[in-house]
């Protein structure tokens, strides 16, 4: 019986050790915290585009529902987004800190539907702006979800990367 007990304890210890090692390699939502405020990040992206962005107005969490009808308040902890106040182009630089990974998933779905609708609206309104929909960025990093509609979304993503090291 002692031999069986030792074997059982050895198996349990190995199992605990294995689970500990596996979990230590996992990342959590808190591993993706930016090194600046959302406002600073959206501002840096707009500045980097130079003349490609016309006057961009910054909006915050309180303005989300007016811009993105259908976003649920309980999904959002913080936000910064930049848009053209006159609506003369489709450019948008949006970063939202969500309240959970489930909310981030829902927000990505919402943004995908939003972009589809916006693309449909713009094809007849300003056909010359349609190239901005070719490389739209909708992604999440931990609790942060982004939407970039602009001429150089690769540049916008690089700047975002520099704040999420």
Image (cartoon, rainbow, N blue to C red):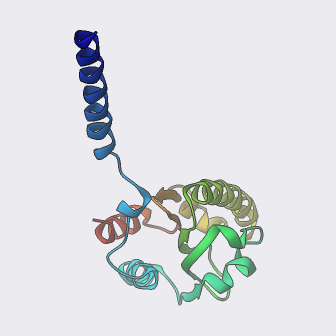
Find the residue positioned furthest to the front: 1
- Which quadrant: the N terminus? top left
- Looking at the rendered image, the quarter that the C terminus falls into is bottom left
Direction from residue 27 to residue 132 in the image, left or right: right
Estimate the x, y position of residue 127 in percent, counting from the top left: 66, 65
Residue 149 seen in this snapshot: yes
Nearer the observer, 20 or 42: 20
What residue do we see at 33% from left, 42% from top?
Answer: 23
Above or below, 1 relative to 155: above
Percent coordinates x, y for residue 106 in the rendering = 65, 56
Question: Measured along the vertical axis of the image, is residue 60 above or below residue 157?
Answer: below
Question: Vertically, is 122 above or below 41?
Answer: above
Left or right of 10, for residue 26: right
Q: Quadrant of residue 155?
A: bottom left
Q: Is residue 87 visible?
A: no
User: Along the horizontal axis of the image, is 134 left or right of 63?
Assistant: left
Q: Position of residue 164 (x, y in %)?
A: 33, 66
Percent across and percent down for residue 138 are: 53, 58
How many marks on residues? Answer: 0
Name the residue: 47% across, 67% down.
151
Residue under the image location 57 percent in, 75 percent down: 77
Q: Quadrant of residue 44?
A: bottom left
Choose between 89 and 110: the one closer to the eye.
110
The quadrant where residue 76 appears: bottom right
């Amino acid at each position: 019986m002692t031999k069986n007990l030792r074997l059982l304890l050895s198996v349990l210890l190995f199992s605990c050790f294995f689970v500990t090692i596996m979990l230590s390699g996992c990342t959590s939502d808190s591993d993706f915290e930016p090194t600046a405020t959302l406002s600073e990040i959206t501002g840096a992206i707009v500045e980097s585009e130079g003349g490609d962005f016309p006057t961009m107005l910054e909006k915050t969490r309180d303005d989300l529902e007016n811009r993105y009808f259908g976003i649920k308040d309980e999904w959002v902890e913080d936000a910064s987004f930049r848009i053209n106040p006159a609506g003369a182009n489709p450019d948008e630089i949006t970063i939202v800190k969500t309240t959970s990974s489930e909310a981030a998933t829902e927000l990505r779905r919402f943004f995908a539907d939003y972009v589809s609708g916006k693309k449909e609206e713009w094809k007849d309104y300003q056909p010359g702006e349609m190239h901005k929909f070719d490389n739209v960025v909708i992604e999440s990093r931990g609790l942060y979800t982004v939407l970039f509609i602009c001429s150089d979304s690769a540049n916008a993503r690089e700047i975002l990367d520099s704040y999420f090291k």
